[in-house]
Image: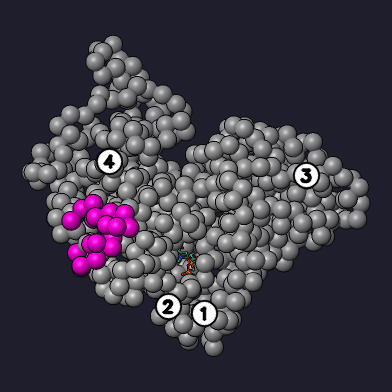
Amino acid sequence: MPPKKTKVALPKNTPLSNWVKREPKPPPESDDDNNKNPKTTSESPSSATSYDDPLREPHPFYKDSEKHGIVLRKFYPHEMSNDRARAYIADEIPRPIEALNAALAETAAHRESVRVQDAVVHWFKMDLRVSDNRALFLAGEKAREAGVPLIGLYVVSPQDFEAHLRAPVRVDFMLRTLRVLREDLGKLDIPLWVETVGKRREVPGRVVELMEGWGARHLFVNVEYEVDELRREAKMARMLMEKGMTLQVAHDTCVVPPGALKSGSGRQYAVYTPWYRSWVKHVHENLELLEMSEPPARNPPEARLKLAGLFDCEIPRAPEGKRLTKEEEKKFAALWPAGEHEAKKRLAKFCEDVIARYADSRNIPSVSGTSSLSVHFASGTLSARTAVRTARDSNNTKRLDGGNQGIQTWISEVAWRDFYKHVLVNWPYVCMNKPFKPEYSNIEWSYDQDHFQAWTEGRTGFPIVDAAMRQLKGMGWVHNRCRMIVASFLSKDLLLDWRMGERYFMEHLVDGDFASNNGGWGFSASVGVDPQPYFRVFNPLLQSEKFDPDGDYIRKWVPELKGVMGKAIHDPYGRGAEVIAKKAGYPRPIVEHKGARERALVAYKAGLESGL
Ligand SMILES: Cc1cc2nc3c(=O)[nH]c(=O)nc-3n(C[C@H](O)[C@H](O)[C@H](O)COP(=O)(O)OP(=O)(O)OC[C@H]3O[C@@H](n4cnc5c(N)ncnc54)[C@H](O)[C@@H]3O)c2cc1C
């Protein structure tokens, strides 16, 4: 069904372009999610395309998302229609996890029948650690039982980095981690083979080739829950079966695997609080979820000789476009030491010194009141299981929701990470540039480049916003409170398309993680699962006064305001520090909050009522 258009009353200062003049439908192309079955008709030469499946028609605003780098057409189809997103909600389109489960079910009997040949392979992805790694342990057991060596594999895919907007700082962290991993595996006589594959489509084929070369029939992986990865694994399960090989998957990245929690009505939770109660109950009833996996068994002694060529594998440089300068490399190596040992050290120190006060300290960006472990969760140098269990064991109760308030609160924050991955799996279109509630696609966003640039550069004239954006550039990391402030500012005060901010974060965060980032942006822009209601708009000045009362955080990241004293730090132009701010070259506010708020409320309401 083509989308209906309903006229809505728009405010005077809202541009009308999105409602009055839309581009003709795009031409047919690609074999991907959104564009299958388009056909050219001779009857309608002006809009040369019609679709056998109307659900494959793109959203009427699809041009905006492409023009502004939100939908990457090099890799993905046009932005899908709201009806297609709703079809996912209504269980009318199989989710990628269902495709993987179907492929695993189809290949189950075959998997049982395949005998181990000369080696077993574990394919590392976002699980770059030796300890407490579910699939790695299983792969090690398989190899040990058969008396053959285990081989570790990591594939560097520059196109995946590009498609998934990997930040250079994150790529750098990952490459440094591979060195640690290679050493740790080496101590167990397990080689780590690292190879770059230029085209992402060629990755599965190359993995099979390598396995053939090593005489391996068993490939172990931990499931990644993003759409591309689930689809690739489904394809690989069948592909490997055709070659007489098998794919063995494990759930590792979440404490509770996605899909395990259902509400009383049998549906997935879309609200955190009841989901969290259910998560706690589920873990209490299934304590094996917190059992840590042993490192893999040591390889047989002859492995060093047999696989000699694999042991001195080079870790490549970051691919072009993802490289840091030498200076940045040095800075970030000092800020974010890589590898699982650093993760464990940081976790132990946090549990010893900080966690008990976490409930009070977590919202103050000028103090080190949080764990800064997100970088390790994102690259898998620390498992959520190990983190939750270690935190629990530092409490005076085995309950996850009891005892010390700081510990409880921290565990509930780690659970947010699980929550957003569960959401991604059940509502996979959030991974395809659609908001959780499809109707929020109909908001007429601004794409003002001057505003966007001011935001990215930390030159909006709102000190707390600017401090946070400069922290992002300076550290590749931002305090959670400040992530919320800048995300709200971008989407509400500037009315910029929240997906531009989501993208920018991914391109700069050392802990960039699709599900958590998307969840955080959805929450702050009020377009996501369990969001802030759209009419609740953060006031940057009040946020600043509440969470950075003395202005320490601002002065650290916006040094030109160092000389501004007292409360004027939160609003130098409005509170009598104009001369200092002006002299220091600090900009005036680029919008006026009250008016911007009104504009946002009207635009959100109009979008929701547009009936598209
Ligand atoms: C707009 C926005 C974007 C975000 N992008 C990311 C991202 O790309 N990657 C990322 O890991 N987190 C993201 N978050 C969540 C959160 O800001 C970070 O996880 C947190 O700031 C990391 O610091 P920490 O490790 O010191 O956290 P702590 O306070 O010590 O929390 C412990 C862990 O719990 C998890 N966690 C805490 N808060 C959240 C949350 N709100 N959502 C999901 N997980 C949470 C993280 O894994 C974190 O490391 C985002 C939040 C917002 C509002």
Span of residues in magenta? 574-592
Q: Label 2's element? A: helix
Whichever of callouts 4 and 2 sits on the residue coming sooner in the sequence is: 2
* Residue at left offset 77%, top offset 36%: 212
Q: Label 1's element? A: loop
Task: Determine the image quadrant of residue 136.
Answer: bottom right
Q: What's the mark number on residue 313?
A: 3
Expressed as whole percent of the image width and height from the top left, the position of residue 51 reads 32, 25
Residue 15 seen anywhere in this rendered image of the structure: yes
Say if disc 2 is inside 8 Å of ligand 1: no
Q: Amino acid at mark 4?
A: Tyr
> Mark 3 packing: few (<14 Cα in 10 Å), some, or many (20+)?
some
Instruction: State the separation of the CA atoms marked 1 and 2.
Output: 8 Å
Is 587 part of what is drawn in magenta?
A: yes
Q: Label 3's element? A: loop
Judging depth in this view, the residue of 15 and 236 nearest the camera is 15
Q: Amino acid at mark 3?
A: Cys
Residue 522 seen anywhere in this rendered image of the structure: no
Q: Could you tell me if the residues under marks 1 and 2 are in contact, i.e. CB atoms within 8 Å?
A: yes
Judging depth in this view, the residue of 276 and 532 nearest the camera is 532
Whichever of callouts 3 and 1 sits on the residue coming sooner in the sequence is: 3
Instruction: State the separation of the CA atoms marked 3 and 1.
Output: 40 Å
- Report the residue marked by disc 4: 447
Residue 590, above or below 400: above
- Report the residue marked by disc 1: 354
Expressed as whole percent of the image width and height from the top left, the position of residue 168 reads 54, 47
Expressed as whole percent of the image width and height from the top left, the position of residue 474 reads 48, 56
| Residue furthest out toward the top | 42
Instruction: State the separation of the CA atoms marked 4 and 3.
Output: 46 Å
* Residue at left offset 75%, top offset 53%: 182
Question: In the shown orientation, is residue 86 left or right of residue 420?
Answer: left
